[in-house]
Amino acid sequence: KAGVTQTPRYLIKTRGQQVTLSCSPISGHRSVSWYQQTPGQGLQFLFEYFSETQRNKGNFPGRFSGRQFSNSRSEMNVSTLELGDSALYLCASSLKEGGGSGNTIYFGEGSWLTVV
Amino acid sequence: KNQVEQSPQSLIILEGKNCTLQCNYTVSPFSNLRWYKQDTGRGPVSLTIMTFSENTKSNGRYTATLDADTKQSSLHITASQLSDSASYICVVSANGRGSTLGRLYFGRGTQLTVWP
């Protein structure tokens, strides 16, 4: 079955612009989470959605937002882009919410965002 | 403070050799520990997941161990191949009421390079 699909794979934006990234989870998965990955910080949790509800949010400014649709697809938006937002943004999906041992988490290939 | 520390930060080995990567954590209460492999520019792929009661788990040439008493885990790679060159990330999940993916704690990874 198809894995987690993220679009676009690569994009370049200028400071001040906004960007929307999309994530289609594995069919049947209702939990979607987003992560920012930079060389210096590793993987940083952004937020998690389950059944269209935001379940948890990481320590990121309000410029970072997301949502989940009824078909479990999710989008994240970053407004007023800053140079420091350049990163790989990873989406992950799982059948259930949470990090329980019975819940395998599958990652997408990521969206590379470069802010210039 | 819940933290996951990995060592070494980077490692170079020759093809065919074995290696061991370390993960120490202070996450509490502990739920499970996962090892992921991330190829450059790709999303992380799950290798193993271990709960409190599991000491060892294998996935092909990858063997993970867990000592929940000392809060240490290791990932042993046997007979390394060029395709093993990647970042290996240790992820620890905390237990708790209503656990969410926000309770996943990530190490910064060990960058393994396998030379021919």
Image (spheres, grey):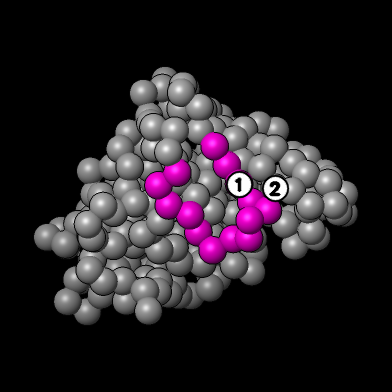
Residues under numbered marks 2 and 1 in contact, where contact means CB atoms less than 8 Å apart: yes
> Which percent across, then down, holds residue B40?
62, 50
Residue drawn at point x = 66 percent, y = 42 percent: A77
Quarter occupied by residue B29: bottom left
| Marks 2 and 1, how far apart at CA | 6 Å
> Which percent across, then down, holds residue A38?
64, 60
Segment colored magenta: A54-67
The chain to which mark 1 is attached is: A
Q: Which residue is mark 2?
A: A78
In the rendered view, tell whether residue B35 sits above or below residue A55: below
> Which percent across, then down, holds residue B68?
19, 71
Crowdedness near tag 2: few (<14), some (14–19) or many (≥20) residues, C-alpha within 10 Å? some
> Which percent across, then down, holds residue B58?
25, 51
Residue A63 forms part of the magenta stretch: yes
Q: Which one is nearer the viewer's eye here, B111 or A3?
A: A3
**Residue A61 shown left or right of residue B22 in the figure:** right
User: Residue A65, labelled with which disc?
Assistant: 1
The amino acid marked with disc number 1 is Ser
Q: Earlier in the sequence, mark 2 or mark 1?
A: 1
Q: Secondary structure at mark 1?
A: strand
The amino acid marked with disc number 2 is Val
Quarter occupied by residue B67: bottom left
Residue drawn at point x = 83 percent, y = 46 percent: A17
**Residue B13 shown left or right of residue A93 in the figure:** right
In the rendered view, tell whether residue A36 sits above or below residue B26: above
Residue A6 forms part of the magenta stretch: no
The quarter in which the N terminus of chain B is drawn is bottom left
Residue drawn at point x = 53 percent, y = 46 percent: A34
**Residue B6 shown left or right of residue B42 in the figure:** left
Residue A111 appears in view? no
Q: Secondary structure at mark 2?
A: strand
